[in-house]
Image (cartoon, helix red, strand yellow):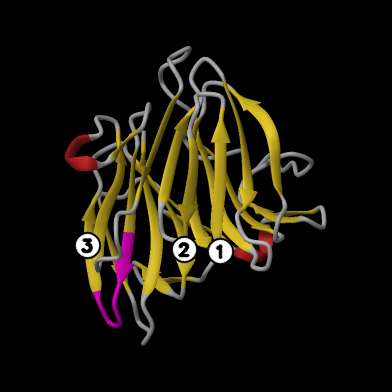
Amino acid sequence: MITLRHSEDRGRANFGWLDSKHTFSFGNYYDAQHMGFSALRVINDDIVQPGAGFDTHGHRDMEIISYVLEGTIEHKDSEGNVQTLPAGEFQLMSAGKGIYHSEYNGSDSENLRFLQIWIQPNTFGQQPGYQQKDFGHQPGLTTIATPSGENGTLHIKQDATLHQLILEPNQSIELNIPTERKLYVQQVKNTAQIDGIQIQPGDGAKIEAVTKIKFHNPTNAISTSLVFELP
């Protein structure tokens, strides 16, 4: 079963310096029908004005992934990490027993746009951690995060896997889904089809009770999706 969550149906918060679209309930946006999906709790599509950002604030027991679509994040946290995260890179911050951090748009003239993703961990009270990596833009399925951190992937504290899916024009790929696993697909750039169902930028798709799924790019432009494999 495939259930679409259209981009225009997401929650919205606009504070001037921040324009955010919420796939799931977050902040002042509440929808009992969209509280998350399996261990996936937050997907916020954030646009931050030049020179603005999130002041120092705390998190605890949450796996927080940032994926930059445009611009650059300036990151600083209580573990001593001071990093720059440019477009195309992934960051995974394990909040563990507690961490404080700030995130700012690193440009004085260009907007920052990134996806802020929260996944609930399956271990609690652990030491906080920080990981960052550019996985490139190769066509096909590239694994970004795994429970073991194998093969150079980011190590996530949950029985979940994150993939980057890039499809060239008219390219297709089939993905086998282990029994009792679920997928969530967030469409990032241009259009794709999931078993013939079209998904547009900003759309999300819950995939349940399916053992094989076909992704296809029917357009003349390169398509980018994030694919979450969840318990």
In the shown orientation, is residue 48 left or right of residue 101? Answer: right
Which residue corresponds to mark 3? 174
> Amino acid under label 1?
Gly
Mark 1 against mark 3, which lies toward the viewer?
A: 1
Q: Is residue 96 above or below residue 152?
A: above
Percent of width and height locating residue 13: 77, 52
Vertical arrangement, residue 141 with respect to residue 221, above or below: above
* Crowd rating for badge 1 (residues with CA inside 10 Å; few <14, some 14–19, many 20+): many
Q: Which residue is mark 2?
A: 187
Q: Identify the residue at image location x=28%, y=82%.
A: 170
For the magenta stretch, what is the residue range?
165-171
Under tag 3, what secondary structure? strand
Residue lying furthest bottom: 220
Residue 227: x and y, percent?
A: 37, 53
Q: How many marks?
A: 3
Q: Cα distance, mark 2 to mark 1?
A: 6 Å
